[in-house]
Image (cartoon, grey):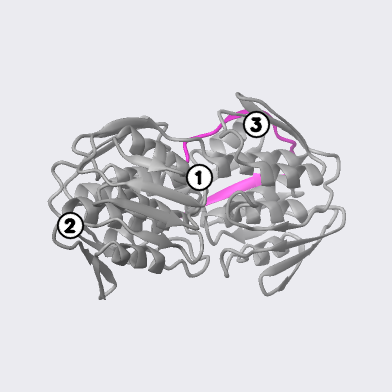
Amino acid sequence: MHRMIIEGGQPLNGDVRVSGAKNAALPLFAAGLLGDGPLLLDNVPDLKDIHTMAAVLRHMGALAEVTDGRAEIDPRPVNNPTAPYEMVKTMRASALVLGPLVARHGRARVSLPGGCAIGERPINLHLKALEAMGAQISLEQGYVTAVAPKGGLKGADFFFDTPTVTGTENIMMAATLARGRTVLRNAAMEPEVTDTARALTTMGADIRGAGTETVTIEGRGSLRGGRHRIMADRIETGTFMVAAAITGGRVRIIDGPQGCLGALEKKLEEAGARIEANDQFVLVTGPDRILSADARTRPYPGFPTDMQAQFMALMTVGSGLSVIQETIFENRFMHVGELKRMGADVRLDGNTAIISGVEHLSGAPVMATDLRASASLILAGLAARGQTEISRVYHLDRGYERIEEKLLGLGARVRRIRE
């Protein structure tokens, strides 16, 4: 098991380049199952979840190769539309193959997904939407089996009770091969949904309204292969923005996504950071002292839940009182106990964290519990006095490509111990 050792107190300065977005890449790997030819993807991040997804596709018979930031997915040899538990038990995104498989092959058997332990993340809305499109759904021994009606899935008008990113992506993909028109209402508006729609469009899909609450898909008889460059990772971008602010540094983030971090930028400016942005980079300059600010997670374009833990790390060294409300996941405060080990003053009241800022954090041995909690502990360690040792950092490798190398390039004193 790996550990990360950080000697804090060093302002970060310099340039860092953002990798491709994991949360955009995973649905695009699933989208590769829909075409009659290969889907070529550029800007693919080198992450554990990516390689797991490629292995799942290969288990189904597809060709799926990932090399040097590029991937090629050829679905033509698929002969086993099953995603087994042994391969997907740690990855929630495995559910994304359900829609493409039942749409293209008429049948899918997918293990109920796993992933970070941050609360219940059911796929019931995915299944209800597929049922509305005519699929027969059964649950048995931890697997979902979906069978399309004779003649294939049919278009439907479906309202999501709550916006769901993977649900919107899953059903949007299935609808590209359904008979007739599908309208998805109360759809998720995240940029990753829009990126998936762009890729599907290059494959011949007819999708309108992606990135809004209503997405309309006109089904096609078939899709072709295509080529697409995956968008930059907005959560990695946000994490480095917070890193600049919490260390009082000056970091230029290159090749980040454009125009989709407005809620975070506003909160960082409230906290005293200076932000300059153009088409090429975002420059963040940290303040001498962090100002406390409140935040409430919301679906896009609101404040992202995937930045809540990182923003909390920043608020632990704020100048006053801040309140953070988590409205997306019910168990996403597991990093609080570890931050308190470093001297943070945080009190929990249901889905609300009340943070009294302290003048400084102190390095301590801590344990990561999930992907974004890992990032929050790294940020806290960068700002703390003394040495912080973070165990179970394998979570990081699910969502941050070569993060210690990027931090070293900004002047951080950080090293990974591989045991």
> Is residue 15 part of the magenta span, yes or no?
yes
Task: Give me the C-alpha separation between circle 3 and circle 1.
Answer: 34 Å
What segment is highlighted magenta in the picture? 1-22
Q: Nearer the viewer, residue 109 or 165?
A: 165
**Quadrant in the picture for the N terminus:** bottom left
Sequence-earlier tag: 3 or 1: 1
Residue named by callout 1: 211
Tag 1 secondary structure: loop
Picture quadrant where residue 31 is located: top left
Give x and y (percent) for residue 319. Answer: 87, 53
Tag 1: residue type? Answer: Gly
Label 3 Cα crowd, 10 Å radius (few <14 / some 14-19 / many 20+): many
Give x and y (percent) for residue 279. Answer: 61, 25
Task: Give me the C-alpha separation between circle 2 and circle 1.
Answer: 28 Å
- Above or below, 26 against 135 in this view is above
Q: Nearer the viewer, residue 379 or 284?
A: 284
Tell whether 145 sits left or right of 21.
left
